[in-house]
Amino acid sequence: MSENSLFQTLSDVSPKGLRLFVRADFNVPMEHGVITDDTRIRAALPTIRELVERGGRVILASHLGRPKGRKDAAYSLAPVAARLAEYLKQPVSFCPQSVGAEAQAAVGDLRDGEVLLLENVRFHAGEEKNDPELARRFAELADLYVNDAFGAAHRAHASTAGIANHLRAVAGRLMERELNIMGAALQNPERPFTAIIGGAKVSDKIKVIENLLEKVDRLLIGGGMANTFLLAQGYPVGKSHVEAELVETARALIRQAASAGKTLLLPTDLIVATRFAADADHRVTALDAVREEEMALDIGPDSINRYRAAVATSRTVIWNGPMGVFEMAAFSQGTLAVAQAVADVTGTTIIGGGDSVAAIEKAGLADRMTHISTGGGASLEFLEGRALPGVESLARRSH
Ligand code: ADP
Ligand code: MG
């Protein structure tokens, strides 16, 4: 059984000679049919390689983009088959269907250790509706279901959840790693445990803040969302992006932190500019000196020092959301400095969230983190403490 014994993994099965329906997350960015970032493909390789080596017949399935339930060549997975073949150094056949006679024939041609990629499962409207009939048709292609699509685990779709009503289901290695590392951090962290939450909006992350506040020792807030907290404390915010309707929520979170004895760090200074532009004039300011025509686009140097110090002595860090508009060099200092501090931590460091991961990669610090989650929305929901349908389906039929 896996570490947490809530689900089974590849270690619990004998894949030799079995037809394995492996749901991966190959939802990669593409431009004109060319893959522009294959991180997700590389993340699926350990599972595929292991199953190939152990003599399984690997049937890969994934979604790509939002093709609206019908065939659309712009969302074909064919380029992914070619990229997989390069990495695996073996042929990967491609079937232009994901169910039905053609898919069955392609599966029938597979021999032990061979790999087949099915076409985009979202070419069927039933995929996103978790249609039981479509789930049954996926299931009839295989003997065993391997769910390695952590990035799609927050969706109850036919290929991420429904299929597990028909087949024994186990987690792939990527799914296992995501759940074990993030699960351990949330359930049994080495302390001090610090969460760093940033990004554009409080509204995107209220539930994450609420859930993490119960578990962490320190919570650091930065990015655009910090402005709403500063407004809640009575500071002027000028033209900064704020969510006025969440000021009361921000106050409640500040109170919640105080009464639970948690350290909640908010910016003590800011980088402000008069325009949202890379070349805008900008300056460092104290919180009470933000002018009407200014907006906060990064945390300031004093905030950086305090955040760095809080991170440096932590043994577990979870980070979701940049500290400023890191896409523009003038407003990237907060994010880069905090990233460096997280990289230097002795302990477990976990990065979740699409833009946070991009910032860490831009800083060249990705391989200094314990874990970079491959699931944007899925890791956010996991950090919210929500049950993920793709994970629940693993628990449902593991015998
Ligand atoms: P993640 O994808 O890591 O979860 P989000 O999507 O929540 O992060 O937020 C990332 C975005 O927030 C970035 O595009 C960044 O430019 C923006 N952002 C950060 N700080 C500010 C700010 N002070 N004002 C406006 N936007 C900000
Ligand atoms: Mg984002």
Image (cartoon, rainbow, N blue to C red):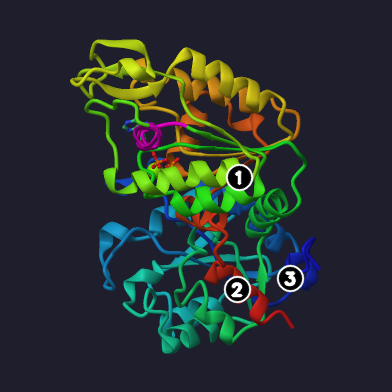
Q: Which residue is mark 1?
A: 259
Q: Is residue 321 left or right of residue 285?
A: right
What is the x, y in percent for residue 186?
Answer: 67, 52
Q: Nearer the viewer, mark 3 or mark 1?
A: 1
Q: Is residue 378 left or right of residue 3?
A: left
Q: Quadrant of residue 71?
A: bottom left
Q: Is residue 58 above or below residue 191?
A: below
Q: Which residue is mark 2?
A: 392
- Chain-order first, disc 3 or disc 1: 3
Amino acid at dot 2: Glu
Main SS category, magenta section:
helix
Q: Is residue 70 above or below residue 341?
A: below
**Residue visible at 46% across and 25% down?**
267
The foreground one among 256 and 31 is 256
What is the x, y in percent for residue 45?
Answer: 61, 52
- Which quadrant would the N terminus be assigned to in this image? bottom right
- Chain-order first, disc 2 or disc 3: 3
Q: Is residue 13 above or below residue 227?
A: below
**Residue visible at 39% across and 58% down?**
78
Confirm or reject: label 2 Cβ below 8 Å from ligand 1.
no
